[in-house]
Amino acid sequence: MHRRHRRRPHALGTGNRPTFYIPAKGDQERLVCYIPPGTLNPDGRNGVVAGPPVGGWVVGRDYELCRRINERTGLAVYSPCYDITSNWDPEEKRGVPAPWIKGVYRHATKTLKHKFLYLVGFSGGGAVASSQLVDYPDKMVQGLVVISGPAAEGGPHTSAAFYADRINVRTLLIYGKLDGYNKAIGVWMERTRQNKTRVDKLYYEGGHDYGKRRDTFELVKNTVIDWLKSVARSPRVLGYHKRRKHGHMRKP
């Protein structure tokens, strides 16, 4: 008789940044990409945002959020590494991030075999998720969650709120009432006022780190999970399934 072992998260080419994958418990088509906090301009490297060193981010807050998402939605959760540079774009007249997210798209579809992607980022990870989606959208992305992300600060990785009208997926913005970065909500809502894309928001009691208090952690966790479930049931995703079934690959 073979002993059944509980499946553990798979380590995926850690290199010099942490990364893991928790397999789906149900739906095999959809993937949650969790982007952890990072550092802007690490070691004096201007225009760069990088994730934490190996083992530095897998703390109770981050891993428990990923684990709960996996358990309660059945979706796979992938947390990639990142070290993203930027370059000045004379046409845009701004610094534009390097297309890091394209590697996530390829890995999600070619290696992990998923069709739909939800981006969830906390702090610097929220800045990365949103800024990448401004310049490198893809029809596989079905939702964006920004938790305490510096998105209205200026700079190549922290300005997504000013270009939020370019993000055409349903979005959830979560910030602490005492977090100085929460001004991104006002900017974001103003930029998308004329858009049909739905933007949801939540203010929690406290500052930047929702994980410092158990009640705020539970509030944010439950909000993210319920929101992901809601987006998965939306007509936009269901319509995409229907078009694929009939051989039509039109953009949602």
Image: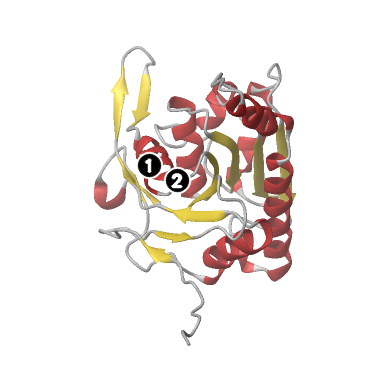
* Residue 172: image location, x then y, percent: 66, 41
Label 2, residues with CA under 10 Å away: few <14, some 14-19, many ≥20: some
Label 1, residues with CA under 10 Å away: few <14, some 14-19, many ≥20: few
18, above or below 34, in the image: below
Residue 18's image quarter?
bottom left
What's the colour scheme? secondary structure
* Residue 186: image location, x then y, percent: 67, 32
Q: How many marks?
A: 2
Residue 72's image quarter?
bottom right
Element type at mark 2: loop
Residue closer to the observer: 204 or 250: 250
Q: Quadrant of the C terminus?
A: top right
190, above or below 22, in the image: above
Mark 1 in CB contact with mark 2 (< 8 angstroms): yes
Q: Residue at x 60, y 43 (%)?
A: 145
Residue closer to the observer: 95 or 223: 223
Q: Residue at x 59, y 21 (%)?
A: 165
Q: Residue at x 70, y 16 (%)?
A: 194
Residue behind mark 1? 110
Give the residue type at disc 2. Lys
Element type at mark 1: helix
Measure the C-alpha gap from mark 1 to mark 2. 6 Å
* Residue 154: image location, x then y, percent: 46, 32
Give the residue type at disc 1. Lys
Disc on res. 113: 2
